[in-house]
Image: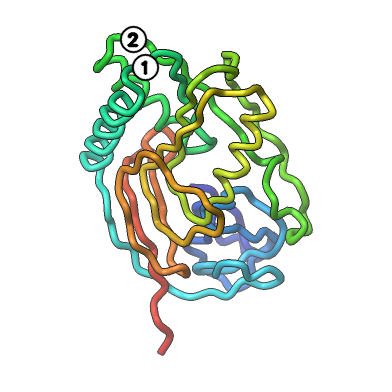
Amino acid sequence: MGYDSCYDGSRVSWRLQQVVSCTCQTPRRSAYLEPREAFLMFGGRWECGMASENTAGGAETQPYTEVAVMEADDIRRALTRIAHEIVEKNQGVRDLVLVGILTRGAPLADRLAEVLQQIENVEVPVGKLDIGLYRDDYAAHPAGRPAPVPTAIPFDVTGKRIILVDEVVFTGRTVRAALTALLDLGRPSAIQLAVLVDRGHRELPIRPDFVGKNVPTARHEYVQVHVREVDGEDRVLIQKPEERR
């Protein structure tokens, strides 16, 4: 959760892709927040309420409802199952490494490593990857490239079987950027994709190898994954814009 202020001093609270609440109608800053698959802040404008997807130059606002589709125990069980599937598919954890896409993929990768160690009694190396400089959508956003977040991969990826971890797969563009970033670091023997939530609507031919939960969504809906390391809780929500009357 982040905060900003409006002209009258009211506080605006937001979670990555939309402003959640505001008591005034004249937000002070200009910052359009993309849906989760973009997850980085670019230029545009603040609005009170929920910013519609791809509405550069003036986001449309509307109320929304939240529906919980996974709670903490569901997430724990899903990660445990994914870990067992990883072991089965790879016949163990030899030459296996985990790489979490920042921000929320990184703590999920750490959790998977803990479960894999419990299963195989072997510590699996974990890295974290920032894909900000590899995105393909900067031309549409006047703010240009965001400031990079440090990538931390403390091992040589060449010859390794990499499990790429993210919380949500949507259009596939974040994963495409991550693949490009990884291949710039070396030549892995294989890259497999593990996601907590697959919400569909792919724009690229990318399919996860391991999925915690398939969540059918409409394209105009939002999937919010909260992890305790970042958000203070484990929960997955679908945010559904309410119909205007």
Q: Residues within 10 Å of mark 2 (few under 14, many from 20)?
A: some
Write down the residue under mark 2: 122
Q: Nearer the viewer, mark 1 or mark 2?
A: 1
Q: Residue at x 27, y 55 (%)?
A: 69
Image coords of residue 243 (percent x, y)? 40, 82
Q: Residue at x 53, y 48 (%)?
A: 2
Q: Secondary structure at mark 2?
A: loop
Amino acid type, residue under disc 1 in the picture:
Val
Image coords of residue 8 (percent x, y)? 63, 65
**Is 69 positioned to the left or the right of 15 in the image?**
left
Amino acid type, residue under disc 2 in the picture:
Val
Q: Residue at x 74, y 53 (%)?
A: 138
Q: Quadrant of residue 143?
A: bottom right
Q: Of label 1 and label 2, which has the lower sequence position?
A: 1
Query: Are the residues tagged 1 and 2 within 8 Å (C-beta)?
Result: yes
Q: Which mark is residue 61?
A: none
Q: Quadrant of residue 140?
A: bottom right
**Is 211 positioned to the left or the right of 74 in the image?**
right
**Front-most of residues 173 and 104:** 173
Image coords of residue 122 (percent x, y)? 34, 9
Q: Give the spatial CA distance, label 1 vs label 2.
A: 8 Å
Write down the residue under mark 1: 93
